[in-house]
Image: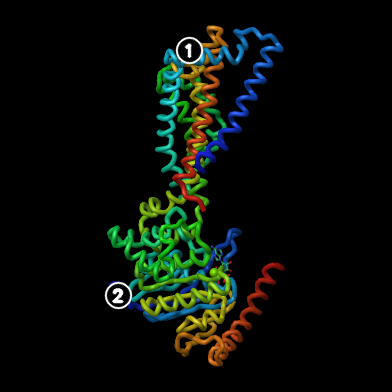
Amino acid sequence: MGNSNPSSGKPITIRDVSKIYESKNGDLVEALTPVNMEIAAGEFVVIVGPSGCGKSTLLYMLAGFSKPTDGKISVGADLITGPDIDRGMVFQSYALFPWLSVAGNVEFGLERKGVPKTERRAIALQYLQTVGLQDFVDKQVSELSGGMKQRVAIARAFATEPSIIFMDEPFGALDALTRRFLQKELLRIWQAHKKTVVFITHSVPEAIFLGDRIIVMTARPGNIKSEIRVDLPHPRDTTSDGFRNYERRIYADLDDELVKAFDLEGRAAGA
Amino acid sequence: MKRIAFGLRGVVPLLLAATAIVIVWQMVVVITRAEPSLLPAPWSVAKTFAHLVGTGELLIDTGVSLARVVSAWLLSAIVAIPLGLAMGRSRALERIVDPVIELFRPISPLAWIPLAILWFGIGETGKVFIVIIGTFFPILLATVAGVKSIDSVLVHAGQVLGCNTPASLFRKVILPASLPSIVVGLRISFGTGWAAIIAAELVAARSGLGYLISNGMEILRADQVLVGMIMIGVLGVCFDAFFRYLNRRVIWST
Ligand SMILES: Nc1ncnc2c1ncn2[C@@H]1O[C@H](COP(=O)(O)OP(=O)(O)OP(=O)(O)O)[C@@H](O)[C@H]1O
Ligand SMILES: [Mg+2]
């Protein structure tokens, strides 16, 4: 399947983006202080940071689900004004439609794009084959394990050929073995289709294994603490010295922020 | 084979319960030597039942009651489901409609019967009106609850997969996601509607199962009253079984 998407190949620009939530009791919560970031087309960017630092907040604004309190996010020359089928998403909780079969889930976006029925089926089969689920095409979602569900979700996100795919801790709920397997699978699919991927994780090894570039965020209010370009060829050997060095650097950056994050929460709880 | 066994498992307890009731009933008749015009024996009620089936009266009255319930119930559903879907998604709409519902809901559909007679006489319109009152709120509330319990992540998934208008989001995500809850509402409301139509027919009607019962009372035929009551019970069980079947077969489960 060629790169038929007209908008692929456009960079994402995040310009002075901040987000302030109003909590239920009227307090203002500053989730992100003005963030600036540039993501190149086809790049695999991984965001790591302490819990509650605004990673999901940033991703939800990138996807168009919520609007920045201030600042601008654009893809190419176009401002993001809402969700779009050209920007796919894989959720931590899979978010499969339980009333549809496995194939029905993968075909959902294709149907919305107006792809004819037989063609849609063929494309769905092809992507399910890519994630090794060709024998589960007509199964119900409730019959799948967690790892299988996330593979369906990945097939569903890639099937519509969006130019960008957002992933919010997609493997967070999976066991270590399944996780390792899906990381490899994701890399393989990404290398074959060259989409822009923005990936959130809590796992430093996962970040180094996957990312072209890793963005470490500060404790809330979230901002960019450091950016690390990973110059290791794929497939990356998690036991190599190079890998270990990256780990050390990122953990060092994160540790400072974790102290602040827990300090912040401690004070909030004490107040 | 399995499905037949499953069906039997549901029917056997009902048959046992029915048998027990008939035995107790017969014992009460024997022990109290009840006046047959007040408490006839099971056997004589069975004969009346067969007689009323033979003359066609029972089936016609059942059909009439059923037609009233089904038409009113469908009318309710046509209005309540879209309204409930919209209310579940719009805080503003919910805030406007909710107080109205809260005020109307405690008023039993039976309390509307006198007004219905004043407004519509004893024709079909009044009956349909009563059943609409009885069926509308259960469907509406179940629909609203269904929409509100949808995981927002499913809505987000729908949006990034091309549901870029409210209409497409409703059709492809909101409606299917809330369908199990809507079917529960339809089932419950059919029960309340069935109860309401009998009551309405007891008060003012020339046909229907409720009329069969009230007519039995007027002509001092307790056996006819009991035939009507049994018919109501049996049909109620059948409807419920039908909706449960629908729920299992048509509706997805997590
Ligand atoms: N809808 C909301 N209303 C109010 N506050 C919110 C809302 N959503 C998030 N927040 C707050 O904003 C901050 C950032 O939340 P966010 O979910 O983006 O964190 P995160 O980095 O994704 O955390 P985690 O790693 O635990 O998923 C948190 O302090 C959270 O409490
Ligand atoms: Mg998060």
Crowding near the residue tagged with mark 1, few <14, some 14–19, many ≥20 C-alpha atoms within 10 Å: few
A76 vs A139, nearest the viewer: A139
In percent of width and height, residue A187 lies at 44, 78
- Number of the front mark, 2 or 1: 1
Work out whether A222 lies above or below A246. Answer: above
Assign a secondary structure to mark 2: loop
Circle 1 chain: B
In percent of width and height, residue A224 lies at 52, 81
Crowding near the residue tagged with mark 2, few <14, some 14–19, many ≥20 C-alpha atoms within 10 Å: some
Amino acid type, label 2: Asn
Residue sticking out furthest to the bottom:
A241
Q: What residue would you read off at disc 2?
A: A3
Q: What residue would you read off at disc 1?
A: B51
Q: Quadrant of ligand 2?
A: bottom right
Residue at 66%, 71% (x, y): give it: A265
Is residue A231 visible to us here? yes
- The CA distance from mark 2 to mark 1 is 77 Å
Q: Are marks 2 and 1 in contact (CB under 8 Å)?
A: no
Q: Are marks 2 and 1 on the same chain?
A: no
Work out whether B189 lies above or below A253. Answer: above
Residue at 32%, 62% (x, y): give it: A120
Q: Identify the colour scheme used.
A: rainbow
